[in-house]
Image: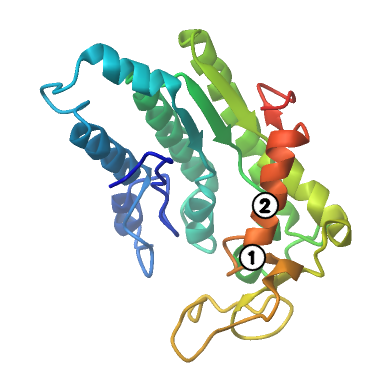
Amino acid sequence: MNSSAGANFAVAGSTAIDHSFFVRNNLSLDIIQQSLGTQLAWFERLMAERGCGGRRHRRLPAACTAEMESALFWVGEIGVNDNAYIVGSRVSPDQVQELVLDSVTRFLEALLSKGAKYMVVQGHPLSGCLPLTLSLVPAGDHRDDLACSASQNRRSAAFNVLLQSRLDDLRRRHPRAIISYADYAAAHRAVMKNPKAFGFREPFKTCCGSGGGPFNFDLFATCATPAVTTACPDPRRYINWDGAHLTEAMYKVLADMFIRRGYCGRRSASC
């Protein structure tokens, strides 16, 4: 694997909590088995292949430390899938939130203990604005000022507050580390409040999906389902790609907001 330009360990549909939790709670239907723990294992395997892991370091420890300290670890949003998978079940959302926070914290601790110094951690987006969520919440679910699920957006906001508290604790325990917070929800909200200003015409409908309606989303016939789903002719006009992920155009806007528009820092300063 050539990682000279970076390496991405993300898996579409993955969860923060280990897959076994969903199996125990009979929620494993169509859920990907990879989790945040899997991604950490893949990273550790890569480092071992580079001579910086396992029982013996083939490279000098100083070289391995320097490599970790010079790298930027961008820890993207994870945990929205965990919440989406329990909608309509008897599993407590508060329990899942705590388990997700514990998993993310353990993951960050593992990287820091290996010598990571520069880190950006994304909060949750407005999960109540995603077609996946909107298709699962009860019909009577209250809509907020963005026409999104108010209850799910409140849950995202609560999670982000707790995540930032965890990051503050990590900063105290690892004073040499530079840990920034990417305010995904605030950036997402700015776009949703005025999508046309960012070049978007479809704030809710998926570009790649099926079923038509206001979301063009069917949980059992999602994007890439053979002979069922189709992609829109111009994804640049859509915020949502497949119901759970955003379009490349939207991610480009968000990246600019994180890097240049002040939506990323210890609290509000630019990354």
| Label 2 secondary element | helix
Q: Are the two marked residues, 2 and 1, in contact with CB atoms closer than 8 angstroms? A: no
Q: Quadrant of residue 55 in the image?
A: top left
Using the image as rendered, state which of residue 222 and residue 86 is in the foreground.
222
Let me know if residue 196 appears in the view.
Answer: yes
| Label 1 secondary element | loop
Using the image as rendered, state which of residue 48 and residue 203 is in the foreground.
48
| Residue labelled with disc 1 | 137
The three-letter amino acid code for the residue at tag 1 is Val
Q: What is the tally of numbered marks visible in this picture?
A: 2
Location of residue 21 in the rendering, given as x and y in whole percent from the top left corner: 33, 50
Location of residue 267 in the rendering, given as x and y in whole percent from the top left corner: 70, 23
Let me know if residue 185 appears in the view.
Answer: no
Q: Dot 1, how many residues are within 10 Å of its Cα: few (below 14), some (14-19), or many (20+)?
A: some
Which residue is depicted at the point 42% across and 28% down? 108
Q: Is residue 29 above or below residue 123?
A: below
| Residue labelled with disc 2 | 252
Using the image as rendered, state which of residue 219 and residue 261 is in the foreground.
261
Q: Which mark is residue 214?
A: none
Location of residue 60 in the rendering, given as x and y in whole percent from the top left corner: 20, 15
Location of residue 183 in the rendering, given as x and y in whole percent from the top left corner: 68, 36
The three-letter amino acid code for the residue at tag 2 is Lys
According to the image, what is the colour scheme of the structure?
Answer: rainbow
Which residue is depicted at the point 37% across and 22% down? 68
State the residue lying farthest toward the left.
55
Between disc 2 and disc 1, whose residue precedes?
1
Q: Quadrant of residue 245 in the image?
A: bottom right
Q: Is residue 242 above or below residue 174?
A: below
How far apart marks 2 and 1 lie (CA) works out to: 28 Å
- Tell me the quadrant of the picture where the C terminus can be found: top right
Single out the mark in the foreground, 2 or 1: 2
